Amino acid sequence: METVGVGPPSVDQIRERAVRLVARLRQAAEANGHDPTRLRIVAVTKTWSVEVARAALDAGLSLLGESRVQEAEPKVAALPGAEWHFVGRLQSNKARRAVLAFPVIHSVDSLDVLRRVDELAAQEERQTRVLLQVNVRGEAGRAGMEPAALAEVPSNLPSTATLTGLMTIGPMGASEAEARDVFGRLRVLRDQLEQAAGIGLGELSMGMTADAEAAAAEGATLVRVGTALFGPRGETLVSSAR
């Protein structure tokens, strides 16, 4: 087994890790009755330099994720060939910049934010795709819409931005069974919302390095992975405090 050390990985290292990871996750998806070809990796490059983000793109990972708008902007400018996904908490004062930088936003955590992103997409003439972040278990202090709030979505569908699915963050330190329960419940909520809204919601953004297999087993289409591809964050990384 490869030892993942501190420091920026090479293109070959990233490619090898990605191939093994995708194979494992697609096997988990297929074993549980899900189409393995629909599962894709969002390579989360937060706190890594633009050179590492470029290495990920060169390794064949075209979906790159960031969680801070100000950190992402120079990477987005340097690597226009990537499809950039915003996966962090969306602050209202950064919403316009997020819409300008990211064609896909995973973390729309309220109807107010959905309306704001839709308004900005219209103003900036952007074809923004959005996912609604759901706090599946209604945990205090955790970002995301309450499951009951999804009942209001059909009457609040965006007119310019495109709603493409749901997103959640799995419980920290959870067992595989606990993680699968949360991810499975998100899939059920997605299916219910599809029927209520009369639209296709093909994306399920769920799972990170620690719970990626549980997410794949429950039908994830977008898995947000950083450490499994790039290794632990260390002194060689860019500052996240910009």
Image (cartoon, rainbow, N blue to C red):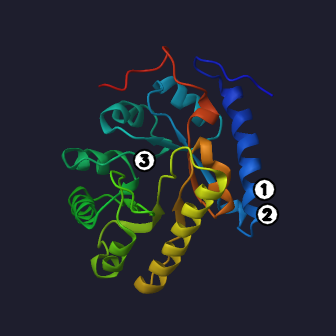
x and y percentages locating residue 99 in the rendered image? 30, 51
**Type of residue at label 3?**
Val
Q: Is residue 230 visible?
A: yes
> How far apart are labels 3 and 1 at the CA level?
25 Å
**229 over 143 or under it: above or below:** above
* Badge 3 element: loop
Residue lying at 46% horizontally and 26% vertically, measured from the top left: 50
Front residue of 35/168: it is: 168
**Type of residue at label 1?**
Gln
Crowd tier of the residue under label 2, counting other residues whose Cα lies within 10 Å: few below 14, some 14–19, many 20 or above: few
Q: Return the mark for residue 87.
A: 3
Q: Are marks 3 and 2 in contact (CB under 8 Å)?
A: no
Q: Quadrant of residue 11?
A: top right
Residue lying at 61% horizontally and 48% vertically, measured from the top left: 211
**Side (left or right) of 151 relative to 15:** left
x and y percentages locating residue 144 in the rendered image? 36, 58
* Badge 2 element: helix
Crowd tier of the residue under label 3, counting other residues whose Cα lies within 10 Å: few below 14, some 14–19, many 20 or above: many
Q: Is residue 58 visible?
A: no
Q: Are marks 3 and 1 in contact (CB under 8 Å)?
A: no
Q: Return the mark for residue 240.
A: none
* Badge 1 element: helix
> How far apart are labels 3 and 2 at the CA level?
28 Å
Q: Quick one: label 3 or label 2, which is nearer the N terminus?
A: 2
Residue position for label 1: 27
Q: Quick one: label 3 or label 1, which is nearer the N terminus?
A: 1
x and y percentages locating residue 111 in the rendered image? 27, 67
Q: Quadrant of residue 12?
A: top right
Residue lying at 35% horizontally and 31% vertically, measured from the top left: 71
Front residue of 142/126: it is: 142
User: In the rendered view of the protein, which quadrant contains the C terminus?
Assistant: top left
